[in-house]
Image (tube, coloured by chain):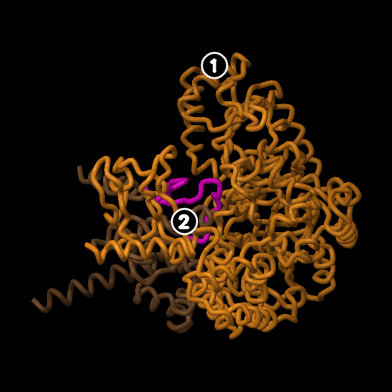
Amino acid sequence: MEKADRKRLNKLRANIIDSRDKEKTCITICGGTGCHAYGCVEIAQGFEDEIKSQKLSDKIDVRVTGCHGFCERGPIVVIQPEGFFYQRVESKDIKDIISETALGKKVLPRLLYKDPQTGEEIQKEKHVPFYKKQERIIFGRNGFIDPTDIKDYIALDGYKAVSKALFEMQPEGIISEVKKSGLRGRGGGGFLTGKKWEICRSSESSRKYIICNADEGDPGAYMDRSLLEGNPHSIIEGMIIGAYAIGASEGYIYVRLEYPLAVQNITLALEQAHEHGLLGKSILESGFDFNIHVFKGAGAFVSGEETSLMSSIEGRRAFPRQRPPYPADKGLWGKPTNINNVETWANVPLIIDKGADWYSQIGTETSKGTKIFSLVGKINNTGLVEVPMGMTLREIIYDIGGGIKEGKKFKAVQTGGPSGGCIPADMLDQPIDFDTLTRAGSIMGSGGMIVMDEENCMVDVARYFLKFTQEESCGKCVPCRVGTKQMVDILTRITEGKGDKKDIQRLQDLAETVKSGSLCGLGQTAPNPVLTTLRYFMNEYKAHIEQKSCPSLSCKDLIVYHIDPEKCVGCLLCKKNCPVDAISGERKEVHIIDQDLCIKCGACLDVCPEKVSAVSKHTGKEKERILKQHRKKKTEQ
Amino acid sequence: MICRIKNSILMKRKKSQSEMENILKQFKPEKKELIHILHKVQSEQGFISPSAIFEISKYLRISEGEVYGVLTFYNAFTLEPKGKHTLTICMGTACHVRGAPAVLDEFSRQLDITAGQTTEDKYFTLETVNCVGACALGPIAITDGHYHGHVTTKEVKKIIDEVKEEKGKNRK
């Protein structure tokens, strides 16, 4: 393949666009993580086989694209150019889609998304309520791109920003443009990207590095994964621009081990970029040399912290280092290094291509642009949503997310992963940006948004996160290693009903110590889930400690399962499903749970028919009453 | 007899040595290659054996202790061989709030091992992962790379049986 210079790249783009028939039907299948798990690969193969056997290849194209974001409804199939949006497609639908929609241009109502409120069938993706309020400047192209083919990206103005940056702009000009755009780091800290670049550029060294942090460790956040898998070239393009601006000659993409498809797609994308002269020696004949390597992580949460990540690339344990010196002065192998998150890099080409003025119109005064959130947990429309900064939580959760599952009551949303906090219902109307979240005691983090309903115990959630950070603490500094362990022990004690009144004060003291005394971001933010739940849900802590009850009926040690003798019809269902044979009673006789044997797995509650609903959970005084009754009966026997 | 045993041990050692040589020669003898090498050994041999640690340390000219220190720091590497099939339960936040702990408990109870352990017959290894990024499907169980979404405690036995049935099929 002939390497492209600037003109050849433009020509290549024009040729790709010309060679493609815009009117030709294209069946696009979402190849995102969620859809993969639903079996989209088989469906895509099914389409290809069927088209081959019917000899329709000249009429219909098939393309597996990046993630569409609406993971709840996968596998998603969109028929272009009309844009008919089909959801929850199964293999049995393939023939109908080809004959009716692809050839006959008729819609199949059974595969359309129905608005749960109005019942209306929606034909096009953009009209689905989930997408309506989103502004998908970064994520929008995913649905049109086959991530394994660089041509798709080039056709959609890909690498145009690189060519503009290399030939029309000076490094200083690029930095000032990025500064002007107001772009802030999407990895968690929210530091001004342009400023960071400037500091690194001014460091004097013959060798500099840039790094893309794709060690997306926050449980419940997967937008970086979807970008890497769905549109890898946008990240590469951002990195080339950044490297040119800073004066770096080598770059690393540090990808999390658990994302094999991301590693595969980004590696392939790098190869293709090389082939097209977009990486390597003298990019687009500009005289600028730059190379990118992929580094596969090895499964340690702390390696998402910038100095730990560098230690890991150097082949050592992912231990953080003291800052200063900051990576911009002394980073990878002691050389000036600039590190940004995946989503930040993906923003860069847009800013260069469309200008800082365009970009800074989106968002709020202090937080510009859009942010991708992964909306998960007890929400109807699970998925990845990209919204302008400043949208309220209510809009995200109710208008886009479709509200809480099974009509339950919203309790809190957890943002920012293990470093973030829980935001309660009365703050739903807060506009979301870096600063409002910090004021609420949480952080933007990488953008995980875990919705919790009335059945989630906030003490348990705090314990969950603390346990996570405690297990992932690297052990280098004492406050984090010992402090988090003590906090987990206290929280576990409280959820087991063994907490005492002084525990709350102990937690608060420990939290402050860990926060101020830890070496790196992991420890400094680890207490946030505890501090926010103490701030907004003190009543739950008190209930656990003082009444030994779990108001959400979630902590195993504080609840009992009980079969209401008035309601039980003796259908044997719970008895059959009990894994430990703790339920006794014959057909048409009232069933009874042996509380000594019960492991509180909840299987009986799950299987009891809705119209009977004889099984229920109890806590506090009611639990004591049931246990007392049980003991009395046992002694009588 | 003793001679024969000695020979077979020597043969084995030679075999593993040449396997290791084949792996090592793909990398530069530089310390920064350590994690890449460990990945390769883990994926080809299923675990990092003491002799592999020795060979790596020799090749990179670092102490065995250093190799050991790095490999035990990361979750990706194991010192013991895993079972034939790996059952991975996602413990990410989205899965957690939807009931993953109960699912893990049930797997653990059915297989009579805790997370991180392998069954005595070396057939199953039970593992947890902190998030696989398929949060829409939570709780998730992964059997040898195959995803099971919206898993409930009721379905645990079925999932285990499915993997076991594979065993039957393979035997036929």
Residue A159, can we see it?
yes
Q: Is residue A153 above or below residue A221?
A: above
Question: Quick check: is B32 in the magenta stretch?
Answer: no
Q: Which residues are magenta?
A: B129-154
Q: Position of residue B141 (x, y in %)?
A: 43, 52
Q: Is residue A307 above or below residue A267?
A: below
Taking the spot 65% from the left edge, 31% from the top edge, the residue there is A115
Q: Which residue is mark 1?
A: A99
A400 left or right, relative to B12: right
Q: Quadrant of the N terminus of chain A?
A: top right
A596 left or right, relative to B6: right
Q: Which chain is orange?
A: A
Taking the spot 58% from the left edge, 34% from the top edge, the residue there is A76
Q: Nearer the viewer, residue A566 or B107?
A: A566
A499 left or right, relative to A342: left
**Chain letter behind tag 1:** A
Q: Position of residue A501 (x, y in %)?
A: 57, 79
Q: Quadrant of the C terminus of chain A?
A: bottom left
Q: Nearer the viewer, residue A89 or B53?
A: A89
Q: Which residue is mark 2?
A: B100
Mark 2 lies on a secondary structure that is helix
Q: Which chain is brown?
A: B
